[in-house]
Amino acid sequence: MPNPSAEDTLLLVDPDLDFLEWATKHLAAKDLRILRCDNAANAIKVIEKTNVAVVVAAMEMEPFDGMELLGRVIQQSPQTLVILTAGFPTTGQIIEATQRGAHDVLRKESLAFELRPVVESALQTQEDRRTADRPIAELPKHDGRVKMIGVSRALQEVFKLVGRVARSDAPVLIAGESGTGKELVAKAVHEYSPRRQKEMITINCGAIPENLLESELFGHEKGSFTGAIARRAGRFEQADGGTLFLDEIGDMPLSIQVKLLRVLQDGSFSRVGSNETITTDVRIIAATHKNLAEEVAAGRFREDLYYRLNVVEIRIPPLRERLEDIPLLAEFFLQRITRKNGMARIRLSAEAVNLLQVHTWPGNVRELENTIARACALASSNILLPKDIPLASAPAKSPAMISTAIDQLINVAPAGVSLLEWVSREIAGRALDRSAGDMKEAATVLNLTPAELKKLLAR
């Protein structure tokens, strides 16, 4: 823990008394005062009488939930930081909590690894704020329509970043491989923003020929080119007051990049074939599967435009880096496909799920959805077995792949720690995440007994 000042008081709020006892011991530090409550109403009473620096509260509580407690704490004590915990927080809960000012949202299954460093971060933030005095403002509650599926820490970080960036009008660059869900993230940014009452207009910069892309973006006057039989408003005009999503911005021709840069600089443009200057109020979200820094270095993308677009970057991890999300995604696609086609309920066998989790998924979430759709179409029963999944067998791990993985672990290991113990803890934590917190299942994966795994985690 950082050296907390005499002002530092930590309040734990959870109906689980065993958790309160564990967390008190786990977070104990010199000069840190730890208070405990088993319900939200008593927590408010404590905050009324005590200068609380950080609150760690469960989502599920009585007589009101953690989200409402967050709002009341911020209203009553704007400087207090709130960390919410939940078994499996939903996309909406994470984004909404972040928007409303939560310092972090943690899964309960990961608290053994994450609670202490997150509380340390919160206390350090409070120490920095004592001189800066920056209050947190409560944001309006909003139930978003976008549903992003995932419990992995990597994807939850994306949710939290969406919650933060949605509040502003800053340009956003969404980076990620094809099929990872970049458009879904763009929709989430829009739907949780103050512009949500207006439309989000989408244009795929790589799917429109260069000679038509300028007209699509900026519009044209009647007779400005062959086929222009009437004046037409472009996407920038249509999106006025809302959001313009430029998908695959890395494929935009250099000639159009120059014109886009002008709009980003002063919000003005002209239709093709017109000298009239039009101004627009549009929030830009761009997405690409390419590495734009490399495209800039190769001369295929303007450096000044890159920095204009990349004010906030949201990087979406590929599916192979969040294997724990695959069972939830597969189940979601199964339900959606069977419901849409009026089919009887189909479920995945445990063996089929295991098969899905060892595939490398070069096509990411889009490939998984198509795979589930094909499996449903060809299913011979209401239970999908490995033979029903249209995938090749899991690729064997070559010695070179294993060697590369070991090298990567060595390279990222913190300095000054026992490498073997650190690797053991990381692998144990990963197994626990993949088993959704099931200690017995994680121990089986690691060929350990539950008692041995608990001992390892305790270290």
Image: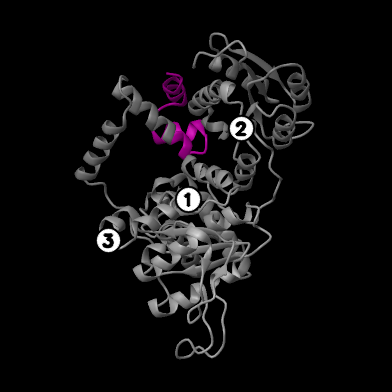
Residue count near mark 3 (Cα–Cα under 10 Å), binned few <14, some 14–19, many ≥20:
few
Q: Between tags 3 and 2, which lies in front?
A: 3
The residue at which mark 2 appears reads as 85
For the residues labelled 3 and 1, say whether their Cβ atoms are less than 8 Å apart. Answer: no
With 273 as the anchor, is 404 left or right in this view? left
Left or right relative to 303: residue 438: right
Q: Tell me residue 184's x, y (percent).
A: 53, 58
Q: Amino acid at mark 2?
A: Thr
Identify the image quadrant of residue 280.
Answer: bottom right
Please provide the residue range marked out in magenta: 431-459
Closer to the camera: disc 3 or disc 1?
Answer: 3
Mark pair 3, 2: CA separation: 46 Å
Please name whichever residue, 85 or 438, is drawn nearer the observer in this view of the structure.
Answer: 85
Label 1, label 2: how many angstroms apart (C-alpha)?
Answer: 22 Å
Q: Would residue 401 appear left or right of 248 to someone viewing this image?
A: left
Do the numbered discs 3 and 2 sit on residues whose CB atoms are within 8 Å?
Answer: no
Q: Position of residue 173 (x, y in %)?
A: 45, 54
